[in-house]
């Protein structure tokens, strides 16, 4: 009994001592709270920026920002802590959003609104969370419109609402809002890129170029932007739009320089197409050959290179490549067919030259070899290749008949 009593007294003394120690611990002053919150906010914000490109993690940034936020949780008649708490909450909400912790992001955006319902940034955050991330376009529009009521000239809010309309398929509303936002911030890279991509996706390639180029002025290392810009030029030129393909070469070259070795293959192909459109066939061949070196399995490229050599009058090289394709049974027939067609064209021209030189017997033999090539193209080909080969067959047969009659001295 005495033992129990002593333990109880000791426990009471220990508890009292702890309380006394806690009471003796000095409380933070307002300035100390502000200083601590600012330091941790700065550290957290720095790691938040680093997390975007993988130099830090969002979890680290969240922990640091939460620590900063905790220092602001005290009564303050000056309003300094309240103001600081709101700024930290904005970064914390964004960090949660990037870390895909959507419920936590929403909690903090709601807290911002509770702290200050006249600050459009809380409504803006909810608009993005619902309209863009969750694809709840009704709620997204509702929140963005609330932000717009509070900040009618805010281009970021206009931009966000435009994206919601775009995703919801309301193109006209999106178009009008993009233009309105760009009137307020004509040099904003994100706005120009987004509107350029919007126009590109709607098939308005030439119009898209203007905005994509403006975005590129400030985002030289934006790989996706460069890809879209290069493709916009190629597609606009295909539609016979008046575009400066020399500028497109600059963008295609930048793509190749930025791309990993594994990706360079397809960007050499893009630049080769631009060279072709500009009539720079030697440069196009060089790029196609670079692409083939990077991807030896893309044997069908030999057909394109062969045609270009033929256009340049380098018939021997063209014929050699065409034969390589024809004899490679691993190559799909749809690519061997145009190789046979090219071989037929080369032989036909050679036969016509022999005919004009009055070497009729040789001309007949060469016309026969052209006919054999076109017949193979008809068997293997389809669509326009097959139609072309059939048309050439009729032509060559007429030439052969003329040559044969001259050879046999009928005419």
Image (tube, grey):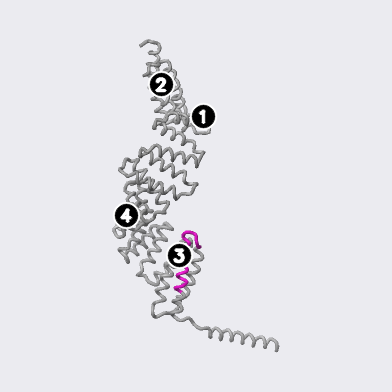
Q: Is residue 410 left or right of residue 298?
A: left
Where disc 1 sits, the SS reads helix
Residue drawn 44% across and 32% down?
306
Residue 173, label in figure: 4
Q: Nearer the viewer, mark 2 or mark 3?
A: 2
- Please tell me whether residue 44 belongs to the stretch shown in magenta: yes
Q: Which residues are magenta?
A: 37-56
- Residue 409 visible: yes
Q: Nearer the viewer, mark 1 or mark 3?
A: 1
**Measured Cα–Cα span from mark 4 to mark 1:** 57 Å
**Measured Cα–Cα span from mark 1 to mark 3:** 62 Å
Residue annotated with mark 2? 351
Q: Position of residue 91 (x, y in %)?
A: 43, 67
CB atoms of marks 1 and 3 within 8 Å: no
Residue 213, label in figure: none
Where disc 2 sits, the SS reads helix
**Measured Cα–Cα span from mark 4 to mark 2:** 63 Å
Residue annotated with mark 1? 327
Residue drawn 45% across and 44% down?
266
Quick one: 79 or 242, which is closer to the camera? 242
CB atoms of marks 3 and 4 within 8 Å: no
User: Along the polypeptide, which appears first: circle 3 or circle 4?
Assistant: 3
**Measured Cα–Cα span from mark 3 to mark 4:** 28 Å
Residue annotated with mark 3? 105
Where disc 4 sits, the SS reads helix
């Amino acid at each position: 009994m005495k033992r129990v009593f002593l333990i109880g007294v000791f426990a009471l003394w220990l508890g009292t001592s702890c309380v006394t120690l806690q009471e003796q611990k000095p409380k933070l002053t307002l300035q100390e709270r502000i200083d601590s919150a600012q330091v941790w906010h700065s550290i957290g914000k720095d790691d938040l920026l680093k997390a975007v490109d993988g130099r830090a993690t969002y979890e680290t940034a969240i922990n640091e920002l939460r620590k900063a936020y905790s220092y602001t949780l005290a009564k303050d008649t000056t309003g300094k802590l309240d103001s600081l708490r709101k700024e930290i909450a904005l970064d914390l909400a964004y960090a949660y959003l990037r870390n895909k912790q959507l419920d936590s992001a929403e909690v903090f955006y709601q807290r911002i609104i509770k702290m200050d319902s006249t600050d459009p940034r809380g409504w803006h955050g909810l608009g993005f969370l619902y309209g863009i991330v969750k694809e709840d376009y009704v709620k997204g529009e509702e929140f963005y419109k609330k932000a717009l009521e509070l900040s009618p000239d805010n281009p970021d809010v206009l931009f966000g609402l435009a994206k919601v309309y775009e995703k919801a398929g309301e193109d006209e509303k999106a178009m009008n809002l993009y233009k309105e936002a760009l009137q307020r911030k004509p040099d904003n890279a994100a706005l120009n890129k987004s509107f350029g991509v919007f126009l590109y996706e709607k098939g308005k390639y030439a119009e898209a170029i203007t905005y994509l180029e403006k975005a590129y002025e400030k985002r030289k290392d934006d790989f996706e932007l460069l890809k879209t810009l290069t493709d916009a030029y190629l597609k606009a030129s295909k539609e016979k739009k008046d575009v400066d393909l020399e500028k497109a070469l600059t963008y295609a070259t930048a793509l190749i320089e930025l791309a990993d070795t594994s990706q360079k293959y397809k960007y050499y192909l893009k630049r080769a197409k631009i060279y072709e459109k500009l009539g720079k066939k030697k440069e196009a061949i060089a790029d196609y050959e670079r692409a083939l070196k990077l991807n030896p399995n893309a044997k069908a490229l030999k057909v394109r290179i062969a045609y270009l050599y033929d256009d340049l009058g380098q018939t021997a090289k063209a014929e050699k490549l065409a034969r390589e394709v024809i004899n490679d049974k691993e190559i799909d027939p749809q690519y061997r067919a145009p190789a046979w067609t090219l071989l037929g064209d080369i032989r036909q021209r050679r036969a016509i030259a022999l005919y004009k030189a009055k070497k009729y017997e040789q001309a007949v033999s060469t016309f026969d070899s052209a006919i054999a090539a076109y017949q193979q193209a008809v068997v293997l080909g389809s669509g326009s290749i097959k139609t072309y080969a059939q048309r050439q067959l009729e032509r060559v047969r007429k030439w052969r008949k003329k040559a044969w009659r001259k050879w046999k001295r009928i005419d």
